Amino acid sequence: MKTACKSEVVHVPRTVEHVVAGQSTSDGAGVQLTRVLSYEWQHRLDPFLMLDSISSNEPGDYLGGFPDHPHRGFEIATYMISGRMRHRDSAGHEGLLESGGMQWMTTGSGVIHSEMPEQQEGRMEGFQLWLNLPAKDKMLVPWYRDFKSDEIPEFVTAEGVTVRVIAGTSHGVSSEIQRDATQPLYLDLHLPAGSHFAHALPSEFNALLFPYRGDLTIGTKIVPSRHMAVLENNANSDGIVLHASEPTRALLLAGRPLRQPIARQGPFVMNTQEEINQAISDLRGGRLTTQKGKQ
């Protein structure tokens, strides 16, 4: 869904604080992936908890998929570049995630879901982001929404940069996914060689960049392909400016930190260990998906 956009001006751009190489790992039933944002960065990059990247032409790397597993207390955004993945959950939701599409799920008070490939060969490429919920929203009724590729807002800047707005608002173009507490910005950027991209950001927001094809330059720092750049928080900064010397694709994420305690164990993210223990007890007692939650 292409639309017109406004320009954004950045006077004091952020610099790069850290460049982090992703960790190769497996999850689900043996799915091979790169953990871009791992456990040790969840406080520094609050409200973001995890970012995984799947990118493979080998069916053996992804065919096992992610059979039934539980969650409570956060949100999950799955964005597919290439491939087909079927979602089913205990709240009665079902959807097919296809190339260019996105799924957004609020796990809230509890849900058991599966994510299984619907292809036997070809490329599987995509990302899964975990976004924290504020304490007051952790027991919300689970919610789920599919977005087809043509439902994701998209615009092209004067520099020729194509921007897909997964969540939040960019250059006056808004996604349907808006969150008052965390105000997440989630962009997929396609930058031609020689282009730059500027985006205003509140100085208190935490932000990261992940170029997944090609390198990007921020200030004087080159961020290599498939590395995460943690952007510095500077009270004087008002945004970010990216430069691409080659055709590049990258994710830009930013959000307002919750600054609340994080208690995390496996598929559960709460505020206290007691709440984690309750989630485990509810799962074992068959109560996880019968919790009423709040509207």
Image (cartoon, rainbow, N blue to C red):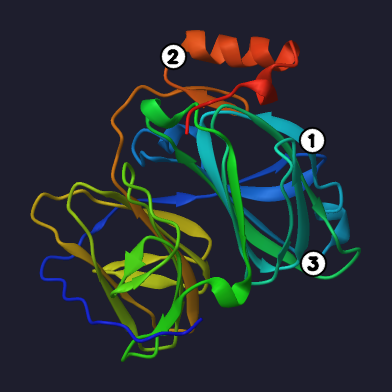
Secondary-structure class at tag 3: loop
Any mark on residue 225, and which? none
Secondary-structure class at tag 1: strand
- Apparent side of residue 246 relative to residue 268 in the rendered image (left or right): left
Front one among 3 and 295: 295
Q: Position of residue 172 (x, y in %)?
A: 28, 74
Q: Residues within 10 Å of mark 2 (few under 14, many from 20)?
A: some
- Apparent side of residue 51 relative to residue 175 in the rendered image (left or right): right
Q: Which residue is mark 1?
A: 68
Q: Position of residue 186 (x, y in %)?
A: 42, 60
Q: Position of residue 71 (x, y in %)?
A: 63, 31
Disc on the earlier residue, 3 or 1: 3
Secondary-structure class at tag 2: loop
> Between marks 3 and 2, how big is the CA–CA gap?
41 Å
Front one among 223 and 39: 39
Q: Which residue is mark 3?
A: 57
Name the residue at 37% across, 60% down.
168
Q: Residue furthest right?
A: 120
Q: Is residue 230 above or below residue 156?
A: above
Q: Amino acid at mark 3?
A: Asn
Q: Residues within 10 Å of mark 1 (few under 14, many from 20)?
A: some
Name the residue at 19% across, 55% down.
202
Q: Which residue is mark 2?
A: 272
Q: Amino acid at mark 2?
A: Thr
Name the residue at 44% across, 37% down.
132
Name the residue at 86% across, 47% down.
64
